[in-house]
Image (cartoon, grey):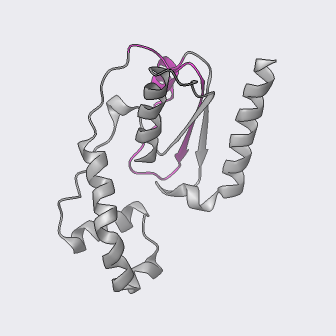
Amino acid sequence: MGAYIAYELYYKLKNSQTEAPEHLFLSGINPPMLRKSIKISHLDNDTFLEQVVELGGIPSDLLKHKDVLNFFLPILRNDFRIVEEYKYEYKSKKIDCGLTIILGSDDKLTQNYNNIWREMAEKEVEFYELKGNHFFLHNHTELLKDIIYKNLMFEDENKK
């Protein structure tokens, strides 16, 4: 969900009087017009949780704590509902800042669409595939920090 929000926010900022972003980092996302849609937000609680666990989004330890799970279940369900209801609108302008796409090697929701991302961007696009499922970010914080740093330093060097 965060990647779609960042993608749309990029265009909102570009179309406003605000300074445009210098770099856009998107993870766990297909190009918005090719997003893989799963419809699970309407499922009963047990089936919904099974689907989220299959995606790797809930640590197995948390499943033992029903009170905590019941507190977060409506929030998690609404996150999925928002993504399910997202409607892509064609953008006539390409992304004209640095773009980095990061995917999980075992993510069931994403596929390798490198050529399409390249067509959507004015500048070169950096791609990374990290080991893990859709929630791979949790296991690679140091590597992600290095990727972000490398790309932002590259942007700074190109400005000079």
Q: Which residues are magenta?
A: 92-121
Q: Is residue 122 left or right of residue 76?
A: right
Out of 82 and 125, give the one closest to the viewer. Answer: 82
Q: In which quadrant of the rendered view does residue 98 lie?
A: top right
Q: Is residue 90 magenta?
A: no
Among the 4 quarters of the image, the one containing residue 9: top left
Residue 30 image offset from top left, x and y in percent = 42, 37
Residue found at x 70% / y 42%: 147
The count of marks equals 0
Q: Residue furthest front?
A: 17
Residue located 46% across and 42% down the image:
3
Query: Does residue 118 appear anywhere in the picture?
Result: yes
- Residue 39: x %, y % from top left: 22, 52
Give the residue displayed 31% in from the left and 46% down from the top. Answer: 83
Give 72 or 32, whichever is nearer the viewer.
72
Q: Is residue 135 above or below residue 150?
A: below
- From the viewer's perspective, is residue 3 above or below residue 159? below
Instruction: Answer above or below: position of 18 versus 148.
Output: above
Q: Does 26 sit above or below residue 79?
A: above
Residue closer to the observer: 128 or 67: 67
Left or right, residue 121 beside residue 153: left
Q: Position of residue 154 (x, y in %)?
A: 76, 28
Quadrant occupied by the C terminus: top right
Q: Is residue 29 visible?
A: no
Percent position of residue 66, x then y: 34, 84
Q: Residue at x 52, y 20 (%)?
A: 121
Assess whether residue 105 is covered by the magenta stretch: yes
Q: Is residue 80 found left or right of 150 in the rendered image?
A: left
Left or right: where 158 falls relative to 10 = right
